[in-house]
Amino acid sequence: MKKLTFKSENITKLYNRRKIIENVTFSLSEGVSFAITGKNGSGKSTLIKVLCGVLSPTKGSLELKVDGTLIPYPDYYPHIGLVSPYLNMYEEFTAEENLSFMARVRNLGPDAGERGEMLLKEFGIFEHRKKEVRFYSSGMKQRLKYCAALLHQPALLVLDEPSSNLDQYGIEAVRKFMVLQKQHGTLIFATNDRDDLQYADTVYSIENGKN
C-alpha cells in the first residue's frame, strides 16, 4: 500500500463571482474511501475537478503526499486515476491503442501491457480490444475509462458517478476495484446512488456547494 495523505483546506471555487463550492475541508489517509454526495447542481463534479487538479481553486489549499513526498498542486497526474463523464478516450484508437498510449505517457514499464489485458478482461471488453472506440457503446466506453484510470495503479482513485452508463456486469466490476483500491491507496467518489455509498468509510454531503 502506498502511504498517502490528502488534505483540503477551505476550498472555494467561483465562476463569474458565483460560489460553486465553498469552504470544503477534509483530511484523508491511505486505506480510506471517501464519498461526496449532494443534490444535482450542488457542486460535486466541480469539487472533483478541483481535487484532481483539472480546475484551480479560487481560494483554499490542497496538499497531497505520496510515500512522504509532497506533490505540488496541480502536478497530481502521475498519482491519480480519474473516471468522469467529461473525460473521453481517443475515438479513432482501439482499446489496445488507447491503453498503450496511456502507458507511454505515464512512462510505465513492460508490465503495463499485461495489466492492461487483465483490466480489459475484468471489465468485459477484452474481445473488443482491437475495435476502434468510436464503435463502442456508451457502456463499453465507460468500462474502457476504468481500464485507463487503473492502468498505473494510482495512489488516489477518483470517480465521478461510478455507476454511470454501466450495466450490472460493469457495476460489479467497478465495485470490485473500489474495494481493491483501499488495499493500496485511497478512493474518492461523487455519487447520489445509495448502493455506492455502502463502499464509503466517510460520506461528505454538500448542498449548494457548502458542507
Image: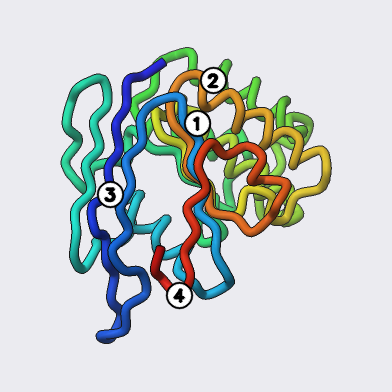
Labels 3 and 4: the sequence-earlier one: 3
Q: Which residue, given by chain and number where applicable, does mark 4 sit on?
A: 208
Choose the circle earlier in sequence order: 2 or 4: 2
Residue at (58, 70) in percent of width and height:
39
Looking at the rendered structure, the number of numbered marks drawn on it comes to: 4
What's the CA distance linking mark 2 and mark 1?
Answer: 7 Å
Q: Give the mark nearer the N terminus: 2 vs 3.
A: 3
Whole-angstrom CA distance, mark 3 to mark 4, is 18 Å
Q: Residues within 10 Å of mark 3 (few under 14, many from 20)?
A: some
- Is there a contact, CB below 8 Å, between mark 1 and mark 4? no
Task: Name the residue at 55% across, 64% down.
Answer: 38
Q: Which mark is residue 203?
A: none
Q: Earlier in the sequence, mark 3 or mark 1?
A: 3
Which element carries disc 2, helix, strand or loop?
helix
Helix, strand or loop at disc 3? strand
- Residue 98: x and y, percent? 54, 40
Q: Quadrant of residue 13?
A: bottom left
Residue at image mark 2: 113
Picture quarter with the C terminus: bottom left
Tell me the quadrant of the picture where the N terminus can be found: top left
Give the mark, 2 or 1, whose residue is nearer the N terminus. Answer: 1
Query: In front of the other: label 1 or label 4?
Result: 4
List the residue tagged with mark 3. 8
The amino acid type of the residue labelled 3 equals Ser
Q: Amino acid at mark 1?
A: Ser
Q: Is residue 200 left or right of residue 10?
A: right
Image depth: mark 2 or mark 4 in front:
4
* Residue marked by disc 1: 100
How far separated are the C-alphas under marks 2 and 3? 35 Å
